[in-house]
Amino acid sequence: MKRCIRTTLVILAIFIPAALTAAPVNGALTLHGGMMPSLGGNLNSYSQTSAPINSTNGIDTINNSASGFDTSPVDRLLGASVGITFKVTFYDYFHMRIGGNYFKSVYGGTGKTVYDDGGDRILKCEYAMWGYDIPVTVGLTIPFWKDMKISFSTGLAYAYGVYTNKFESDAPLEYEGEFKGWALPLVIHLEGEYFLTRQLALFTSLSYYNGSTNVLADRKQDDDAANKDYASIDFTGYRYNLGISYYFKPI
Amino acid sequence: MTGNPSMKLSVRTAFILLAMLLFASPLMAERNIGVGLHLGGQHNTGNIDSFYQYAQADPQNSMFVGISFKFSAPFAFLRTGVDNSFAINKGNVLEDQSISTDHTSEGLDTYQLSYTAIPVFAGLQFPLQDKGVFYLGGGIAYFLGTGEVKSEASGTAEDISATALAFGFISGMQLHLTRKISLYMEWEYLEGRSKPVTQTSAAPTYENFYVDYTGHRLQLGLMYFVL
């Protein structure tokens, strides 16, 4: 049995690269930038759900307002991303892609709310997130003449994120958290390329990531045990990208 | 009022040149400026799960009618318009399962929202010979909503209004029926929440309930191409 498996693997190891070498293979490099609505999801953490803040769903339910208090809404994070992707196509219809993306929150995450600490108090809130991911997907491509390609692929990404939050009031109250971690979110990816020349194409894509880290402990060194916070980093969400692709061989 | 003759000539020449450029440009090709009328639907309007994560709810469903304006170059597009939503059914929170510790009587009974959305999307489009177009773009939308919520705390229905800015994307396809008319189908996803607009708890007496416009919208319509 073992010998049979070994023989099969040896045959595959010889013939697959040989077949790929003989196959019409093309490579493409894409530079892209985009947006990520709701980066990090609701950014919930233990310190927000517990008293006195008592926000059940993180950033979503942290907003309170009351007359006589100068509050401003804390919006979910909007992320911006830049990235590079290398794609190999086989026989025009099959492809594998590997990329690298850097993302960072650029909008939302700051504001003031009011909370009950025996009396009404203003709470200043700050949320931020950045990270990078390396998606690897395989899928199908439909070329439409020499004008365009539409591709669909699925796979996994290695995603690393750093999420920080800070809550401050004159109670005095101060929670400051920093969470670092990685996950392997599932990736669904749809992309389109419009060829300006036989090697250069405009690129657009829509990706959906689904996955989050385990629950992570607050990494802030100056926190005492009472201020220790816990959260997971959520990479789930949609990403829209625009960019430009260069094919190594004319299509 | 009389103008300088040479000035008038320059303006006229500029207009003629502009008109010639416009005619020569791809903007004058077919199906570059379209006006559409569509009908759409949304499930879980108000995205009640974001406020009550563990709620047992019968969420609101909505339909909407909208006008869209689409400006297309050979490979790019700009899509805007106005959508008006109407509730098909009221949202009903059967059990909010709130885990908050100091909100003594938190709870929302029913809610009903309607809104006007003004989205602007831009992106790339992929013409499929003369059969149709596939397009994908990102953008923003401004929401103006009104509604009615009934909470356990007050026991009475209260009118609310809320605005919000949302971010998202659009993916759509047009099927050309004639040289001037296309059938289109679109999927929009937008993320946006308002500031708190009303209170749902007896104590503390804060406005805490916000209108969440986040959601998927599907729409089907007909587009007439002016140019």
Image (cartoon, rainbow, N blue to C red):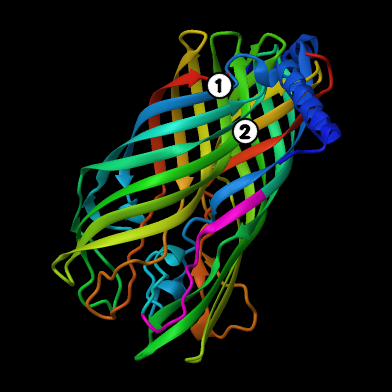
Front residue (pair A68, B60): A68
Query: Residue at the location (17% across, 71% down)?
Result: B154
Q: Which residues are magenta?
A: A67-80
The quadrant of the image that shows the N terminus of chain A is: top right
Residue under pointer 1: B134
Q: Would residue B111 be found to the left or right of residue B17 on screen?
A: left
**Nearer to the camera, A198 or B184:** B184
Give the residue pinned by disc 2: B123
Amino acid type for the residue under numbered disc 2 = Gly
Q: Nearer the viewer, residue B115 or A78?
A: B115
- Residues marked 1 and 2, same chain: yes
Q: In the rendered structure, the residue with mark 1 lies on which chain?
A: B
The image position of residue A230, as x and y in percent, is: 50, 70
Give the quarter of the image for residue A186. top right
Q: Where residue A148 sits: x, y (%)?
A: 68, 17
B176 or A86: which is nearer to us? B176
Is residue A77 a member of the stretch shown in magenta? Answer: yes
Q: How many marks?
A: 2
Q: Are marks 1 and 2 in contact (CB under 8 Å)?
A: no
Indicate the amino acid at tag 1.
Phe
Is tag 1's residue or tag 2's residue first in the polypeptide sequence? 2
Q: Does residue A1 show up magenta in the picture? A: no
